[in-house]
Image (cartoon, helix red, strand yellow):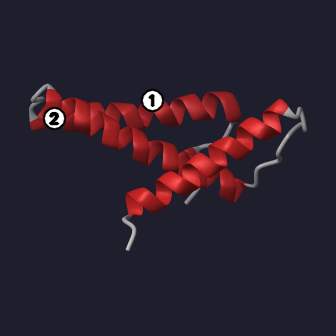
Amino acid sequence: MKTLSEILHINLVDIENALWSHQADKKGMINFTQASFRAACKIFLTVMTEKIFEKQDKTNMPLEERLKEGENFGDELRQLILKYTFVDTKKLY
């Protein structure tokens, strides 16, 4: 049985390839739904959170700093998305 990591890898790479093809063929806007936008945000947040944890482990960051950095990342990401899309990610769920 495949692990979740293996399943997601295949699907995410397929999505990436489809997006590259769509862009290369200049097919225009994809018109993502609100649910698609929410899913993309969740995927990005999950991947970034794992990478942040990996960095924190490598640098032996103390727990209190880890928590603060994670909170800061979430707040900054929310503000970035809100600034450029007018979508408040706290209201997606």
> Image height check: is 44 above or below 11?
above
Q: Is residue 91 visible?
A: no
Question: Would you say 64 lies left or right of 85 here?
Answer: left
Question: Would you say 2 lies left or right of 9 here?
Answer: left
Residue 2 or residue 32, whichever sits in front: 2
Q: In the image, residue 50 lies at what x, y percent?
A: 32, 43
Residue 14 or residue 71, whichever sits in front: 14
State the residue lying farthest toward the front: 1
Which residue is found at the position 42% from the left and 43% from the top?
Answer: 47
Going by the numbered disc 2, the residue's amino acid type is Asp
Going by the numbered disc 1, the residue's amino acid type is Glu
Which residue is found at the position 9% from the left and 29% from the top?
Answer: 60
Which residue is found at the position 68% from the left and 55% from the top?
Answer: 36
**Mark carried by residue 76:** 1
- Mark 1 and mark 2: span between their CA atoms? 21 Å
Please report whichever mark, 1 or 2, sits nearer to the chain's N-terminal start. Answer: 2
State the residue lying farthest toward the right: 27
Q: In the image, residue 28 lies at what x, y percent?
A: 89, 36
Q: Give neighbour class at mark 1: few <14, some 14-19, many 20+ (Cα, 10 Å).
A: few
Q: Is residue 47 visible?
A: yes
Q: Nearer the viewer, mark 1 or mark 2?
A: 2
Which residue is found at the position 56% from the left and 50% from the top?
Answer: 12
At numbered mark 2, what does the secondary structure look like: helix, strand or loop?
Answer: helix
Q: In the image, residue 62 lies at what x, y percent?
A: 9, 32
At numbered mark 1, what does the secondary structure look like: helix, strand or loop?
Answer: helix
The residue labelled by disc 2 is 57
